[in-house]
Image (cartoon, grey):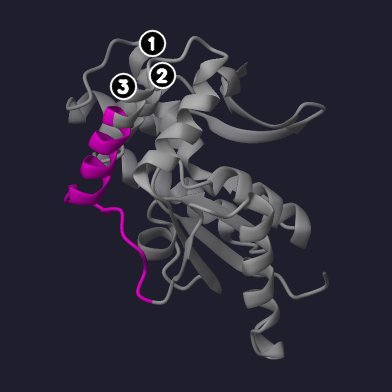
Amino acid sequence: MNMKPLLITIDGPAGAGKTTVSRMLADRLGFVYVDTGALYRGVAFEAAARGLAPDDEEALGALSAGLDLRFEHTESGVRLFSGERDITGSIRTPEITMLASAISARPVVRQALLDVQKRLGAKKAAVFEGRDMGTVVFPDADVKFFLIADLKARAMRRFLEYRDAGAPRFETVLEDMEKRDANDSSRAVAPLKPAGDAVIIDSTDLSPEAVVEKMVALIRSLPESSR
């Protein structure tokens, strides 16, 4: 699909399908995919490794400013590195997920990662996945999407992801997700909400492929000067 470089944001709550859809859309368009949630998980992983409390602003600020987080293309796909260590496989646990939600509300952490994200988006031709991409990080993005889905459907998706790694009970996943929704939506800094000009897509009863088709159709409907 030939078009000029666009900056596309995909926001939404946990389990709505952002990661899968963002990867697929980026591949379809030939764009770069950027998982900004992985950056916060990276900070959470390093904070946990150092035993830092999620409300220790000073320590988290120093940690975030000193980390070398970056994405690298490898034979195994895009991987997240912290320094020389590949931490991709260590940041998807329930514990890191909850910790990432807590520390992402800290202004010092958000500010440190804001610069990283803006640098990654400077050349456009990218799909950015997150929770405040269209509202805070890239308010002037060319196209903004916001994925939603029923809470139980989202919890089941996450439960199935965790299952092979010794997942907690479905009820525990559901409870944790409900708490995370509340945390993300009510925080004072960059709360989870759709941008005023975002296209909202309910993925509850849609396959990832169907969601991507909706997105591509919308992008194709843009004025030729915009794509």
- Which mark, by number, is residue 172? 3
Real-space Cα separation, disc 3 to disc 1, in angstroms = 24 Å
Q: Are marks 3 and 1 in contact (CB under 8 Å)?
A: no
Residue drawn at x 61%, y 59% is: 211
- Type of residue at label 1? Ala
Mark 3, Cα crowd under 10 Å, few <14 / some 14-19 / many 20+, is: few
Amino acid marked by disc 3 = Thr
Residue 49: give its label: 1
Q: Nearer the viewer, residue 113 or 208?
A: 208
Q: Earlier in the sequence, mark 3 or mark 2?
A: 2
Relative vertical location of residue 144 with respect to residue 41 in this rendering, above or below: below
* Residue 151, magenta (yes or no): no
Q: Does 211 sit left or right of 172 as displayed?
A: right
What residue would you read off at disc 2? 46
Q: Position of residue 148 (x, y in %)?
A: 42, 55
For the N terminus, the image quarter is: bottom right
In terms of depth relative to the viewer, which is nearer, 218 or 206? 206
Q: Residue at x 61, y 57 (%)?
A: 127
Q: Secondary structure at mark 1?
A: helix
Quick check: can you spot residue 46?
yes
* Magenta-tinted stretch: 175-196
Residue 39, position as x, y percentages in the image:
47, 36
Q: Amino acid at mark 2?
A: Glu
Residue 181 x, y percent position in the rendering = 28, 43
Residue 108 in the image, given as x and y percentages of width and height: 27, 40
Mark 1–mark 2 contact, CB under 8 Å?
yes
Q: Horizontally, is 161 left or right of 61 in the view?
A: right
Left or right relative to 208: residue 69 = left
Q: Residue at x 49, y 9 (%)?
A: 166
